[in-house]
Amino acid sequence: MIQVGDHLPQATFRVTGPEGPLARTTDDVFKGRRVVLIGVPGAFTPSCHRNHLPGFVTKKDEILARGVDAIAVTSVNDVFVLDAWSKASGAEGIEFLADGNADFAKAIGLEMDGTGFGLGMRSKRYSMLVEDGVVKILNVEETPSKAEASGAEALLKVL
């Protein structure tokens, strides 16, 4: 599992562009930037949609005021689902990074096997602060249905 002080591994996300899906690498997202990254098991799932993401949408300006360049959320969903979730959540200004095959989640050791619930391989729930590709803060939830240790309020306390 990735730890504070580690560099993020190279991975490719999919994002929605004006002409359709685009590839963005970890360097594209994190190099030279201070980014809050939120990892969630799935778009539109109850805890992600009702508890985790809304805190970051509500606290976006407060987080950015602490010297953060961007807030991004990643989930093991396709780019079209993440685009719909972004719009449904009113999450303007937050970057949505599709990790459709769980390649990034696996590369950082934060994958979660949800096959027992019909979900397949997913990401654990977490939040992290990444500075120029290096993990500076990492909060991983022990219980996937909770969004406490990885929530916006908890992160603001340590930013």
Image (cartoon, helix red, strand yellow):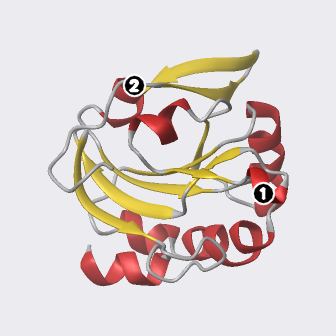
Q: Residue furthest left?
A: 5
| Picture residue at 68% right of the left edge, 78% below the top | 51
Q: Which quadrant holds the C terminus?
A: bottom left
**Residue 76 spot, x, y in % from top left:** 66, 42
How far is disc 1 from disc 2 in space, using C-alphas?
A: 34 Å
Going by the image, does 52 lie left or right of 155? Answer: right
**Residue 134 spot, x, y in % from top left:** 21, 44
Please tell me how crowded label 2 is: few (under 14), some (14-19), or many (20+) other residues with Cα within 10 Å. Answer: few
Q: Which mark is residue 65?
A: none
Front residue of 85/94: it is: 85
Residue behind mark 2: 28
Select label 1 or label 2 by which is in front: 1
Mark closest to the chain's N terminus, 1 or 2: 2
Residue behind mark 1: 116
Going by the image, does 97 lie left or right of 8? Answer: right
Amino acid bearing label 1: Gly
Is residue 93 in sight in this rendering?
no
| Picture residue at 66% right of the left edge, 73% below the top | 54
